[in-house]
Structure formats: structure tokens, C-alpha cells
Image (cartoon, rainbow, N blue to C red):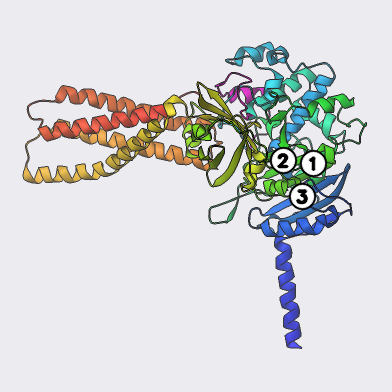
């Protein structure tokens, strides 16, 4: 009896434990056929459940998955925990942050206005903006809405002031755009460089044309049209506050695999990534882009608009964007979609119109890959390069070897250095095959046309999904750009960031760090010894030398704290960074005054050793300050 009771208790506890980390699918409708990758649809429930069991609690605490076929949700699953602390399971009503999938709603809004004849994709966007805004908004090049939808508006990255404060519900899109202003580093149309800023600008254009605040426009013209009743677009969910009760907590995972609650995102440039909603609501949005043959999407007035929207809008022959949707080569036919990331959530939306098949994935963990991109690769598949009948005379792949950096880098900001901590290395395996290495991700590509490389099957699934094709742009027989599309182009290192310059930066940093950490201790020891031995020396120079050393130490500490602060949370307010920059200026001024004062006070009492040490300290301090200037640690206004 006791043994049976013990077994029952043990079984009950085991079931409770399993349910606390893994909740099974909500429903699955039996359907014949296969996914684009070949997975049988009549086994989709057990297949997805088995896949998710491997990853829930490992790559994400919670997730929701929906599969769409022929205009219906044939599977909807909820897994894991929405709240670790309260042990709340994810279910069909759980609300997630959609992240950058929100951009698809912005592009849909744009195309609705195009359809109505109120917006021309190829007109200068200034045409639609108020004069007062245009006077304050500075650009180097004119841009069109097509440039914005292609992520080819020329803007680099700007990471500051992306988030609204918790205690303020005020949302003003114009102010958010004017406050966060990246420079246009590229001529529009020359590179695919992802831009949250430009997307927010597109939302503001919609706002100006429609006369409604953007979140109100998308609620009325998108959410309400397709019964997305558990969705909100306002940064604080003010347009559907009731769903706040069902919102999941958000997490990040550390290097040891532990999950930490990192809160919710309230995005100032909200058309770029502020929508919150359930898995089934997002599935409804996807279904609207796959109407039955001959039918019109409920989001548009005629079928031609959807046809145009799902056609390439970037350069001919370049896999990239289709009026804001990203293009993918699925295993059998073209696919369209978009991913999303906020500070605590990840998502993926992908569909194959010819197969009437779609996939939506939502997770409550930042930078999650195994479920979002992993399921994409597993169910949609990727077109793998065919190595038969390749051209015999193709350019030598060895000419393309080298390091490349993302063109989305935040140039002229204190966070620019981060772009060079994760660069891409291209190695030639043979005359026709290259290896693409980005951090721990590795893939192999074969050349199928001059300077065009397609991925091989022995590559990481993320590269297969996101970087399926690489096209090298050449100038004077040298590679200057890797065209990937989808906002992810790379460039060769700029001249001022060449390998030799980067190595020099590291050398100066290491020497300066060692000198300014060790020298204050050495100075104290030397001063004590001089006093004991009553050594005759220029005491003023000794004091100046000590002060210069302390300035160098203060420079080092100030900027180490700044860099650490930026790396922990790059989306900070610039006002939080400003104080560090001001300290750099104050230390630079003090250092300059000390150098001048030292020059005045050199005399016969100044020993040779003092002069040598002073020159060494002066040269290293000046080099270190120059390094900080070179890496934008003196930028007062961005």
C-alpha cells in the first residue's frame, strides 16, 4: 500500500514538473500533404511537440507556434512558461511582443495608401511631411518610400533613445524621429542596410497622410478588418489595454544557460517594432496574405495590390525585399516573411504563397534562434546550391578572401566599436568555394555565377535561412561589398578601420591600460624611495608626471565604465552617455594644461630619467586620447 502510494505521489510530482516547463499543443486539424521541406502534415502535431520538447527551457522559456495551410490554422501550440516566477504556462491567450514583424503592418499601411492613390512610392518623402518637421529634419540625400521599404535609405544604425520610460505614456512619433537621427552614410539604393529609424519615418508618413496617429490607423485599417482582437500597436498597449493582463514576461539567457527577467520594451519609434498580440492573431495577419486564388485580401481593395506587394522591389536579380517583406528561397518555391527581436522576445513569420503554407513563431526570450529560425529551416527548408553544370570559367574565389563588417554599423557613435567585435571572415576553400564565418556561425558557399555564391547543405541553419545567397560587388577588381539583401549587407573594412589600424588600436589600448593601471602604484613607490634617499630632483615635474598618470588612469576608468555600460544595454538614452563624454573633455583639457605647464617647468634640476619618463607618459597619453577620439568617445552630439 505504502509502495503504491509512493508511486502515485512520485508520478504526480513528475507530471507537475513536466507541465511546469512544457505545455502541449492547443489543437491540430488533420490535413494531408507536406510542408515545403517535406514534413508530413498529418503528423504535424507530434512532430512540432517533439521538436519543441528539445528546446523549451533550453533556448526559450516559453513559445507559441501556429501552422497555416490553405487559409486555415491547422495547428496552434503553446509551450513552456509565460512567467517563471509565478509558474504561469503559455496558452492560446498569451500575449507576446512581435518585435520587427510589426514592420509588416507598417508596410501594409503604406500599400493601402498607395492603392488609394494617396502615396507614391517613388516620390520624395518630404512631399508628405509638414513644413515644420521638414525644417528640423536633416538629411544628406533625398529618399523615397521605396528606398525605405527596401531598407536602402542610406541610414546607418542609431542605438540611443530607442526606448520610452516606464513612467511616461506620452507617444509622439515626430519627436521620436527628430530625437534619434542616424546619419546617411550611403547613397540611397546602393546598399541594403536595416533601419528601424526609416521604418518609423514611414509610419509618420502614414500618420501625416491619414490624419490619424499611426497606432490608431493600423488598429482601424488592419487589426479590426481581420478581427485581431487580442492585439495592440501602442507602445503601452493603450489601444487595447485589456491584453496587458495576458502578457508574458520576457527573458534573456546568460552564457551559463540561466534565464533572467529583462522586462518589456516600450519603443519610441513604435512603427518599427511595438505590436503585442497572440499567436492566433498573428496567424490571421499571415492568412490575409494568402487569399484563395482570385480572391482579394481583406487588407486591400483589389488583388493587384497584394500581387505588387509580394513582388521584388529591390534590384533585379538580388534576393532581398518585396515591398518590405523579406524574400527567402524555400526548398521548393519563393517564400516571404520577417523576424523580430526586442530586448526580451523573439519571433518569426514566414509563408510560401504557392504552397498556401505559413508558419508563425513567438518566444519570450531575446535573440532566440533554435525555435524561430530552426523551425523556419525545419518546416520551410532552404534552396541548396546545385553544383551540377556550373560554369567552368568563374572568378577565383581566393580574390574575395578577407574580413567584412556589417553596413548597419553605428558610425560616429561611441558604440561603433561593437561592429568590429563581430565581423565576417571569408576564406577560399578552393577556386570556386568559400567559407563564411561569423562569430560561431559557419557556412560554405559555391560560386554559381560570377561573384554569386549559393549556400551548401553543410552550413548552420541560420545562415541557410538568412544568408542563402551572397553577391560580391567589385570595384577595380577588389571586393567592396557583400550584397545579401534583407537589410544585411556587408562592406569591406573602411580605410580608417583597416586591419592594420585595428591592430594598432588594440596595441595602444593594451599599452595604455597596462601603463595607467600599474604606473600610479609605481609612482607611489618611487616617491617614497626618493624621500628616504633624499634624491635631488625637479619636484614640480614629479607632481605633474603623477597628475598626468592619474589623468590617464581616470581616462581608462571612465571609458571602461562607458563601454561596459553600452555593451550591457546599447539601447540607452544618449543623456546617460553624455556625462562620460563630458568627463573625457575635462580630462583632455586638464592633460593639455599639465603638458604645457611641464614644458614651462623643465630646468636643470630635471633629471634625464625624469625627462624620459615624462616623454613616455606624454606620448602614451596623447596616443590613448587620440584612440578615444578615433572611436567617437568625444562625440558630444549625435
CB under 8 Å between discs 1 and 2 = yes
**Callout 1 environment at 10 Å: few (<14), some (14 to 19), or many (20+)?**
many
Question: What whole-number distance in Å separates the C-alpha atoms at marks 1 and 2?
Answer: 9 Å
Tell me what residue is drawn at x 25 percent, y 30 percent. Answer: 619
Disc 3 is placed on an element classified as strand
Residue found at the far bottom of this picture: 1
Q: Circle 1 is placed at which residue position?
A: 282
Determine if the magenta segment contains residue 527. Answer: no
In the image, residue 77 sits, relative to residue 226, either above or below, namely below
Give the side of residue 346 with respect to residue 30, left or right. left
Picture quarter containing residue 301?
A: top right
Query: Mark 2 vs mark 3: which is more N-terminal?
Result: 3
Disc 2 is placed on an element classified as loop
Location of the N terminus (image quadrant): bottom right
Q: Circle 2 is placed at which residue position?
A: 98
Question: What whole-number distance in Å separates the C-alpha atoms at marks 1 and 3?
Answer: 10 Å
Q: Circle 3 is placed at which residue position?
A: 65
Query: Mark 1 vs mark 2: which is more N-terminal?
Result: 2
Q: Give whichever of 132, 149 is nearer the camera.
A: 149
Is the magenta region chiefly helix, strand or loop?
Answer: loop
Is any atom of residue 275 visible in this view?
Answer: yes
Magenta extent: 166-195
Is any atom of residue 285 visible in this view?
Answer: no
Q: Give whichever of 253, 532 is nearer the camera.
A: 253
**Callout 3 environment at 10 Å: few (<14), some (14 to 19), or many (20+)?**
many
Return the x and y of residue 20 as percentages of the image width and height: 71, 62
Amino acid at each position: 500500500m505504502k509502495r503504491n502510494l509512493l508511486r502515485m505521489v512520485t508520478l504526480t510530482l513528475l507530471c507537475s514538473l513536466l507541465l511546469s516547463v512544457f505545455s502541449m499543443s492547443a489543437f491540430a486539424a488533420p490535413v494531408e500533404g507536406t510542408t515545403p521541406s517535406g514534413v508530413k502534415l498529418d503528423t504535424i502535431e507530434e512532430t512540432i511537440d517533439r521538436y519543441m520538447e528539445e528546446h523549451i527551457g533550453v533556448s526559450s522559456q516559453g513559445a507559441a507556434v501556429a501552422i497555416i495551410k490553405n487559409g486555415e490554422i491547422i495547428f496552434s501550440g503553446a509551450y513552456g512558461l509565460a512567467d517563471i516566477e509565478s509558474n504561469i504556462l503559455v496558452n492560446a491567450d498569451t500575449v507576446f511582443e512581435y518585435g520587427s514583424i510589426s514592420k509588416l503592418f507598417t508596410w501594409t499601411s503604406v500599400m493601402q495608401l498607395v492603392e488609394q492613390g494617396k502615396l507614391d512610392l517613388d516620390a520624395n518623402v518630404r512631399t508628405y511631411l509638414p513644413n515644420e518637421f521638414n525644417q528640423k529634419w536633416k538629411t544628406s540625400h533625398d529618399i523615397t518610400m521605396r528606398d525605405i521599404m527596401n531598407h536602402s535609405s542610406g541610414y546607418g544604425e542609431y542605438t540611443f533613445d530607442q526606448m520610452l520610460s516606464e513612467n511616461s505614456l506620452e507617444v509622439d512619433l515626430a519627436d521620436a524621429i527628430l530625437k534619434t537621427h542616424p546619419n546617411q552614410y550611403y547613397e540611397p539604393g546602393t546598399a541594403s542596410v536595416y533601419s528601424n529609424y526609416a521604418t518609423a519615418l514611414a509610419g509618420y508618413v502614414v500618420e501625416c497622410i491619414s490624419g490619424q496617429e499611426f497606432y490608431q490607423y493600423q488598429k482601424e485599417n488592419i487589426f479590426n478588418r481581420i478581427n485581431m482582437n487580442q492585439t495592440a500597436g501602442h507602445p503601452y498597449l493603450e489601444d487595447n489595454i485589456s491584453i496587458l493582463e495576458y502578457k508574458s514576461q520576457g527573458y534573456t539567457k546568460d552564457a551559463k544557460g540561466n534565464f533572467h527577467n529583462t522586462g518589456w520594451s516600450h519603443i519610441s519609434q513604435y512603427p518599427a517594432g511595438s505590436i503585442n498580440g497572440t499567436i492566433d492573431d498573428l496567424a490571421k495577419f499571415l492568412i490575409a496574405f494568402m487569399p484563395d486564388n482570385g480572391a482579394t485580401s481583406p487588407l486591400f481593395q483589389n488583388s493587384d495590390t497584394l500581387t505588387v506587394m509580394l513582388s521584388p522591389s529591390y534590384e533585379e536579380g538580388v534576393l532581398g525585399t518585396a515591398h518590405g517583406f523579406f524574400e527567402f528561397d524555400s526548398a521548393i518555391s519563393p517564400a516571404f516573411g520577417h523576424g523580430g527581436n526586442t530586448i526580451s522576445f523573439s519571433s518569426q513569420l514566414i509563408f510560401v504563397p504557392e504552397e498556401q503554407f505559413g508558419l508563425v513563431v513567438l518566444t519570450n526570450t531575446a535573440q532566440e534562434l533554435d525555435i524561430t529560425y530552426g523551425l523556419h529551416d525545419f518546416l520551410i527548408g532552404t534552396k541548396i546550391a546545385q553544383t551540377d553544370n556550373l560554369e567552368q570559367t568563374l572568378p577565383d574565389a581566393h580574390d574575395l578572401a578577407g574580413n567584412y563588417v556589417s553596413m548597419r554599423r553605428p558610425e560616429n557613435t561611441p558604440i561603433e566599436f561593437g561592429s568590429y567585435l563581430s565581423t565576417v571572415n571569408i576564406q577560399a576553400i578552393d577556386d570556386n568555394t568559400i567559407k563564411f564565418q561569423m562569430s560561431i556561425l559557419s557556412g560554405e558557399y559555391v560560386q554559381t555565377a560570377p561573384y554569386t555564391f549559393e549556400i551548401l547543405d553543410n552550413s548552420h541553419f541560420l545562415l541557410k535561412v538568412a544568408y542563402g545567397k551572397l553577391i560580391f560587388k567589385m570595384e577595380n577588381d577588389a571586393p567592396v561589398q557583400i550584397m545579401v539583401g534583407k537589410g544585411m549587407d556587408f562592406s569591406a573594412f573602411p580605410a580608417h578601420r583597416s586591419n592594420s589600424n585595428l591592430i594598432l588600436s588594440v596595441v595602444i589600448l593594451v599599452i595604455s591600460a597596462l601603463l595607467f593601471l600599474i604606473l600610479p602604484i609605481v609612482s607611489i613607490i618611487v616617491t617614497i624611495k626618493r624621500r628616504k634617499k633624499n634624491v635631488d630632483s625637479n619636484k614640480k615635474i614629479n607632481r605633474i608626471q603623477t597628475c598626468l598618470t592619474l589623468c590617464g588612469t581616470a581616462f581608462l576608468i571612465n571609458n571602461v565604465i562607458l563601454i561596459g555600460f553600452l555593451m550591457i544595454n546599447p539601447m540607452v538614452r544618449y543623456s546617460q552617455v553624455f556625462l562620460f563624454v563630458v568627463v573625457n573633455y575635462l580630462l583632455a583639457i586638464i592633460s593639455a594644461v599639465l603638458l604645457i605647464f611641464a614644458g614651462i617647468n623643465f630646468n636643470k634640476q630635471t633629471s634625464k630619467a625624469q625627462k624620459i619618463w615624462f616623454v613616455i607618459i606624454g606620448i602614451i597619453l596623447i596616443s590613448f586620447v587620440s584612440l578615444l577620439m578615433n572611436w567617437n568617445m568625444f562625440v558630444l552630439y549625435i
